[in-house]
Amino acid sequence: MAELIDGKQLAKKVNAQTEQAVTELKTQGIEPKLVVIIVGDDEASRIYVRNKNRKAQQLGINSETKQLPKDTSQTELLKLIDQYNQDETVHGIMVQSPLPSQIDEAAVTRAISPAKDADGFNPENVGKLYANSDLNFPVSCTPKGIMTMLAAYDVQIAGANAVIVGRSNIVGRPMAALLLNASATVTVVHSHTQNMQAYTREADILIVATGIAHLIKGEDIKPGATVIDVGMNRDENGKLTGDVDFESASKVAGKITPVPGGVGPMTIATLMQQTVELAKWSE
Ligand code: NAD
């Protein structure tokens, strides 16, 4: 049986470090502040935002949620973002997706100041990630949290064959860049890939982010591989389930993340960690 990569436990450790860092910053007169903007009344978004808020408050981060009506215009949203960009007491800004159709998501990611970009989606920060910059800059929290998990569980990255299933801007692409920067041999497979299993079966590190429940099974995995399941899907009973069939995969993998309790808690912990980093870097 594979060793379990316990994201919940690791998130507690990361959160404890973040809390400590907040205490230290406060002694220097800096109170880290995160602003989360939510447009419309999507139920899932509201739950995510509430969880982020709660976690921030637990760690001593000043967290403000700005709820806007679903008919908010793009101009109004960009104006609000600009106000927060100018506000020196604010260190991190994020806009919860999905956004209503009248708003251009790409324009929103461009509008958030790169120095306050809590999600790491601004093209300037994405460019630094791809250029393997040695400056300080924020990175998409889910892949950044996965790098923390791989390090905590002593997974060898340099020289490893890393295969990523999925090429989204928030998971697959930044994950590929982070692993490449850490000297893995990186392959990205996606919905147009032919014979995907030929790639996944060669992976020492397999990261799956597709949103398709149980797409990857034990037979698709190299014996002893590290398997990271990013998927968050609801099964027919409303239960949270991953993109990896845990039962068969955990018999083949060397290390594996569960769903829930794997990548999810690490994403929120990383958002908190990154907010505090933004506050530090703003000095
Ligand atoms: P997305 O829909 O933006 O992208 C899905 C990707 O999967 C695409 O690149 C597509 O090419 C690929 N794909 C689709 N079908 C495929 C197939 N049959 N074979 C191979 N590749 C295929 O999704 P996303 O935003 O990257 O999210 C993926 C999953 O991860 C979702 O379940 C989402 O809820 C979850 N997620 C979880 C967290 C977390 O914190 N745990 C964070 C982000 C996303």
Image: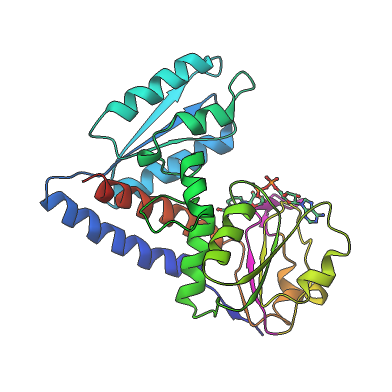
Against 181, is 201 above or below?
A: below
Q: Position of residue 119 (x, y in %)?
A: 46, 44
Against 233, is 11 above or below?
A: below
Q: Nearer the viewer, residue 22 or 42?
A: 22
**Residue 68 covered by magenta stretch:** no
**Residue 231 covered by magenta stretch:** yes
Q: Position of residue 134 (x, y in %)?
A: 39, 59
User: What residue is shown at x 58% (from left), y 22% (from top)?
Assistant: 103
Q: Quadrant of residue 208?
A: bottom right
Q: Position of residue 209 (x, y in %)?
A: 67, 56
User: What residue is shown at x 47% (from left), y 51% (from top)?
Assistant: 139
User: What residue is shown at x 49% (from left), y 81% (from top)?
Assistant: 154
Note whether residue 261 is visible: no
Q: Quadrant of residue 206?
A: bottom right
- The range drawn in magenta is 224-242
Q: Nearer the viewer, residue 177 or 33?
A: 177
Q: How many marks?
A: 0
Q: How is the image coloured?
A: rainbow
Q: Position of residue 259 (x, y in %)?
A: 62, 62
User: What residue is shown at x 40% (from left), y 25% (from top)?
Assistant: 81
Note whether residue 226 is visible: yes
Q: In which quadrant of the rendered image does the N terminus lie?
A: bottom right
Against 199, is 283 above or below?
A: above
Q: Is residue 91 left or right of residue 186?
A: left
Q: Is residue 212 left or right of residue 255?
A: right
Q: Is residue 134 left or right of residue 143?
A: left
